[in-house]
Amino acid sequence: MRIAIDARMISPGSMHGIARYVYELLDCLVTSGFDYEFFIIVNPDSPLENKVWPKHMRLVTVQGSWMSLRQQWELPQVLRSIKADLFHAPSFMAPLVCPCRLVMTIHDLNHMVLPQFYTPLHQFYYQIFVRSCIRRSDFILTVSHFSKEEIVRNLSIAPEKVFVTYNGVSANYRPVTDPERLEYVRDLYELPETFIFCLSNNKPHKNVHQLVRAYCFSQVTIPLVLACPVDRSIIRIAENYGKKHLIYFSKFIDEEHLPSVYSMTHLFVYPSTYEGFGLPPLEALSCGAPVVVARSSSLPEVVGESAIFTDPFDYQDIARALEVGVSDESLRAKLTIFGMQHAQRFSWQAMTDQTIEIYKKCKTGEGTTTPTSEASRGKAGAL
C-alpha cells in the first residue's frame, strides 16, 4: 500500500503544534510500518531533506506551500503520479478532489467554534473547504476525546468514524540537572534566577492577557516570563499595576532548549480557554515542573490529577492558583512526582501504532468499524 503523508508544515524554525505531531509520526514510522510505502510530501528546503530515510520512506517535493490554494490542484496531480492508495492529511488542509482514500487528523475545531477570532476569509475556508474534506474522509484521527466530541457534534460526523490517538512526549523532555547546561540556557534567553513561565502565542483563546492581569493582581513577586511576541497591551496592563519590571518577554525558544527552561521554571502556567490537546503542559510535567492549567476543553483530560486547575475566565481565580503554585512547597513536591509519572503514559510510538491500525483498515477496505487500537476503548488506554 502506498501512503502519502503531508509534511509541508515542517519548516525551518517551526516544530511546535501540528509540525511536531507530523515529525514524531514520521520519526516513528522509520522503524514501523514496513508493510507500506510512504511518500512524504515536502516543500523545497524542508528540514526533512537533511534526514536519511529508510527504503520504505521517500520524499516528494511540491511547490505549493501548506495553507495555499495551489495545493487544491497540485496535490491531486502528485497523488496520481505516485499512485497513492491513501493520503494522510495531518491537519485541516486537504484537496477537495482526492484521487485516493483520505485520512485526516483534526487536532481541534477552534477556527469553527471561535469564529470571532478569525478573518471572514478564514471562516469561509473552514466552513466550505475544511468541512467538506472532513465529511469526505474515510476516517478522522483526533488527539483527545474532547476534540472527538467537538467534531461529532459540530460536523455531524458518525462517532465510529473518529478515532482518538493521543499525542506523546518526546524522550528529550526530561528534567535537566546539569548546572552548566542550565546556566547556558538561562544566559542565552536572559532568564531571571527564579521565574514563572508561560509558553504561548498571542491568539485570544490562549488567554495571555488574562494571565498577566491575574499575575499583577496576585501577591506573587517572582518574575513572569512570557515566551510570546511582545505585546504593548500586555505591557500597559503591567504598568497599571506597577509590575512592568516583573514581566519578561522571551525571544523564540528553540526546541532543544525547552527541557532546560521547563526544568528551571518555578511554575509553568497554561491558561488557554480552548485546546485540542495542549502539549506544553504535558512536556512541562515530564520535566518536573509544577503546572497550573485552565479547567477547560481537553486540558483536564490530558494532565489528569497532576496539575493545579483554575477558571480561565476569572482572573482572581488564576491569581489564587499562581499564589498556591508558588508558595505551597508540599503541593509542589507532589505535583512534580505525580506529573513526571503521568507524562510517561503518553508515547509517540503508541500514537504511531494506533495510526497504522487506521492505515490497515484502509488497506483492507474496511468501513467505519471499531478499531483494535487502545485509542478507541472508552477514555483511551493511555490514561
Image: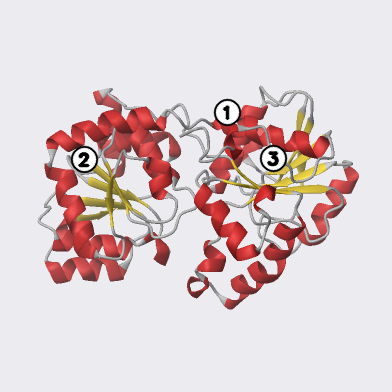
| Residue sitting nearer the eye, 129 or 196 | 129
Q: Residues at badges 2 and 3 in contact (C-beta under 8 Å)? A: no
Figure check: 97 above or below 251: below
Q: For the N terminus, which image quadrant? A: top right
Q: Position of residue 51 (x, y in %)?
A: 64, 29
Q: Amino acid at mark 3?
A: Thr
Q: Amino acid at mark 2?
A: His
| Residue picked out by circle 3 | 370
Figure check: 181 above or below 148: above
Quadrant of residue 212 in the image? Answer: bottom left
Residue at 20% x, 52% y is: 321
How far apart, in angstroms, are the residues tagged by discs 2 and 3? Answer: 44 Å
Q: Residues at badges 1 and 3 in contact (C-beta under 8 Å)? A: no
Badge 1 marks a residue whose secondary structure is: helix
| Residue picked out by circle 2 | 266
| Residue sitting nearer the eye, 214 or 7 | 214
